[in-house]
Image: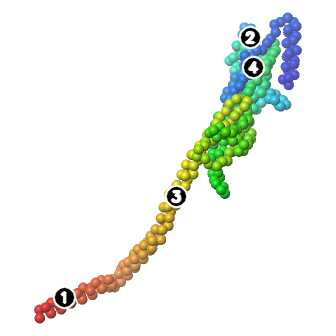
Amino acid sequence: MFQILTILLLETQLHVVSGGRELFTVEVPQQLYVVEYGSNVTMECRFPVNSSLNLGLLTVVWEQKRQGQSKPKEVYTLRNGKAFPLSQHHDYKGRATLLHSELKLGRAILQITSVKITDAGSYLCLIDYQGVDYKYISLEVKASYKRINTQVMRKPGEDEDKFVFMCQSEGFPLAEVFWQNEKNFNITGSANTTYMLTTDGLYNVTSILTFKPNMSENYSCVFWNKELNGETSAHISTSALMSTQYSGQKSFILFIIPTCVMVAVLPSALVIFQKRKSLKNGQLKKDRKRKLNPNLKDENRDDFNSQTEALYLSTVTASRDSGS
């Protein structure tokens, strides 16, 4: 639709030029914009305004087309001074707008917020205002691999335990991952690197290196973005891995010793508890019997009285013998 409109408008422009009027020209102060993923961008094209702007005569069309895309996307359209939000492509709804305050200065500025990877491409800026002209502007979106997530895991083996070091990050374009030790020896051949595309168009890159621990070496993973000529790296020390392993063994020892002590002491404690419980239950039974039968004699008291009486009689007999 807009390609046909462009042809018609260009024909009109040629007709105006043949009539001796000055050529209407659209200019762009910047033909290429390179922005970071998630940031905002403002792209501008300029057109001549003689004295004051007659907004009712102005039409501004912004379109975007990516390589391999069959049809362009309508980013923003202002026709005869009025916006047409219904015709705007859903990818740009709520994110793309035209700065109306700048139109009176002859500046058609398109602002896109929260830039996505899919926003990259070629943008057409077409202006119809007492003449017609258009220009193309290129937008490139980069997403640096700023943050590298790392994870360390133990992998038990038959001969010796190995450690697995994983690096994961997201960015765009696709990055290469290199591994090296502290002597800068390339050990990338021992790593397994995979990637997948996210819904936002980013590359999720994961690289895994499996190695035996060595106290004298450190390892690094480097994400190299060739197109952006940038790299990000993460480092890990094998000595830290070994200390982690030792801490795990120490924690196990600290756990097992108290457990063994508890297992040894618990049976004795249970025996003592059972004896105390039996004595207590016996005393409670005696107390209940005395309450139910007050005339019932206390066996312990009878034993005590018998012993006291025998002691008294032996004392009296001894006195009589000494008196005789």
Q: Nearer the viewer, mark 4 or mark 3?
A: 3
Which of pointers 3 and 1 lies earlier in the amino acid sequence? 3
Task: Give left or right: position of 165 versus 310.
Answer: right
Residue under numbered circle 1: 315
- Tell me the CA gap for discs 4 and 3: 68 Å
Near-viewer residue (33 or 222): 222
Q: Secondary structure at mark 1?
A: helix
Q: Residue furthest bottom?
A: 324
Q: Does residue 16 appear in the picture of this structure?
A: yes
Residue type, numbered disc 2: Val
Residue 225: percent from the left, percent from the top?
Answer: 71, 33
Which of pointers 1 and 2 lies earlier in the amino acid sequence? 2
Residue under numbered circle 3: 253
Residue type, numbered disc 4: Gln
Task: Give left or right: position of 75 versus 314.
Answer: right
Residues tagged 4 and 2 counted as in contact (Cβ below 8 A): no
